[in-house]
Image (cartoon, rainbow, N blue to C red):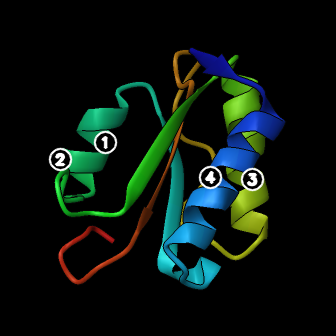
Amino acid sequence: MSYTKQQIITDIDAYMRQHGSPNSTWYVGIASDVRDRLFNDHNVNEKSGVWIFRQAISSSVAREVEKAYLDAGCDGGSGGGDASTIYVYAYRKTNSTNP
């Protein structure tokens, strides 16, 4: 299921509040293969880690959501991906995640 910008922000905001930590402890990014990015590249623990992702309706929406979270103080980087990059993900950083 694909989500609009506001739907993604609403879902991620609620998840972040539920797990309570400042924005600086969260990493937000975009990916075309979100599971590989989360669990391999970032080394997030699939079972015990604190993570969420949503499929955006387009890559431009995914980039807008990513920018909103980076502007709000979350960790991450902009400018990656291509037209197939439609997933937005967030995870709470730990000693074992990268970063």
Amino acid type at mark 1: Arg
| Front position in the image: 36 or 13 | 13
Gap between marks 3 and 2 measured at Cα: 23 Å
Return the mark for residue 53.
none
Gap between marks 3 and 4 measured at Cα: 14 Å
Q: Earlier in the sequence, mark 3 or mark 4?
A: 4
Circles 1 and 2: CB atoms closer than 8 Å: yes
Amino acid type at mark 4: Ile
Residue 13 picture quarter:
bottom right
Residue at x 21% of width, y 48% of height: 39
Q: Is residue 81 above or below residue 47?
A: above
Residue at x 71% of width, y 60% of height: 69
Q: Position of residue 7 (x, y in %)?
A: 75, 36
Q: Which residue is mark 1?
A: 37
Return the mark for residue 67.
3
Q: Earlier in the sequence, mark 3 or mark 2?
A: 2
Q: Earlier in the sequence, mark 2 or mark 4?
A: 4
Amino acid type at mark 2: Asn
Q: Which residue is mark 2?
A: 40
Gap between marks 1 and 3 measured at Cα: 18 Å
Q: Earlier in the sequence, mark 1 or mark 3?
A: 1
Describe the element under mark 3 as helix, strand or loop.
helix
Gap between marks 1 and 2 measured at Cα: 6 Å
Amino acid type at mark 3: Lys
Q: Position of residue 65 (x, y in %)?
A: 73, 44
Q: Earlier in the sequence, mark 1 or mark 4?
A: 4
Describe the element under mark 4 as helix, strand or loop.
helix
Residue at x 69% of width, y 39% of height: 8
Nearer the camera: disc 2 or disc 4: 4
Extreme residue in the front direction: 18
